[in-house]
Image (cartoon, helix red, strand yellow):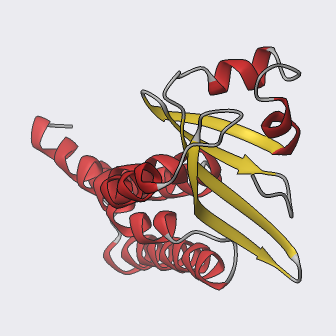
Amino acid sequence: MNRRSWYFPIIGALAAFVFYIPFLYAKSFDLESIGYMLFLLLLTIVFIIGILVRRVFLKRWINHASLLTVLFFLGISIWMFFSTEYLRPWARWLIASGRYTNLVLQQKPDPQTGIRYVEWDAWGWAGMDTSVELVYDPTDTLAHEIKYNPKGHFAEIAEKTNSVQQLGRGWYSLTLYTDEVL
C-alpha cells in the first residue's frame, strides 16, 4: 500500500470524532445514542453489501484503503461510544469550560470545605437522576482526599461521590450517586 492510501483511514478516524462530538456533548443514553448506533450498523451493512456487489458484478475486491477507512471509522466510533463516561467530562470541559468556570467562581465558597461548585451535567429518568458537579477546589486536594482518605476533610462529599475526574489544576468533575446533591 502506498503512502497516500494511509490518508483515507486517517480521514475515516477523524470523521468518527467529528460525527460523535455532538452525541458526546449531549450524551444521555437514550434515543440519540440508539440512533447513532443504528447509523453505524446501517453504515456497516451498506458497506458489506457494497463489497459483495462489487465482488459479484465487477469480479473485484475493494482496495485496502477503503476497507481501512471504514474500519477505522467504525472502530473509533464504537470506542468513543463505550468510553463516553470517561470522555464526556473532557469534551464538556473543552467546549464549555469558560462559561462554567465563571459560574463556579461567582459562587460563595462552602464554609466547611472551601470549595465552590455548580451543577454541570445531569441525566436520568423516572426519579432516578444522576448529577455531575463542576467543582473548584483551590487547595487542589479533592481527588486525592476522596480516593485515599474518604473519612477526612471531604468525608461528606466522598459519601455522595461515585467518581471524580480532575479536569485541570483545582477543577474537578464529580459524578454523584443517584439522587445525591452536594
**The residue positioned farthest toward the left in the image shown:** 4
Instruction: Give coordinates of residue 47: x percent, y percent.
Output: 45, 72
User: Residue at point 66% right, 67% down?
Assistant: 122
Q: Is residue 13 above or below residue 141?
A: below
Q: In this rendering, does residue 63 appear at all?
A: no
User: Residue at point 39% right, 51% down?
Assistant: 101
- Total marks drawn? 0
> In this orientation, which residue lies closer to the viewer: 37 or 45?
37
Instruction: Give coordinates of residue 182: x percent, y percent.
Output: 75, 52
> In this orientation, which residue lies closer to the viewer: 175 or 70?
175
**The residue positioned farthest toward the front in the image shown:** 111
Give the side of residue 117 with respect to residue 104, left or right.
right
Give the side of residue 48 with respect to residue 34, left or right.
left
The answer to which image quadrant residue 103 occupies is: bottom left
The answer to which image quadrant residue 141 occupies is: top right
Instruction: Give coordinates of residue 99: x percent, y percent.
Output: 34, 61
Give the side of residue 9 with respect to residue 81, left or right.
left
> In this orientation, which residue lies closer to the viewer: 62 or 3?
3
User: Residue at point 57% right, 50% down?
Assistant: 117
User: Residue at point 65% right, 26% down?
Assistant: 143
Which quarter of the image is occupied by the N terminus? top left
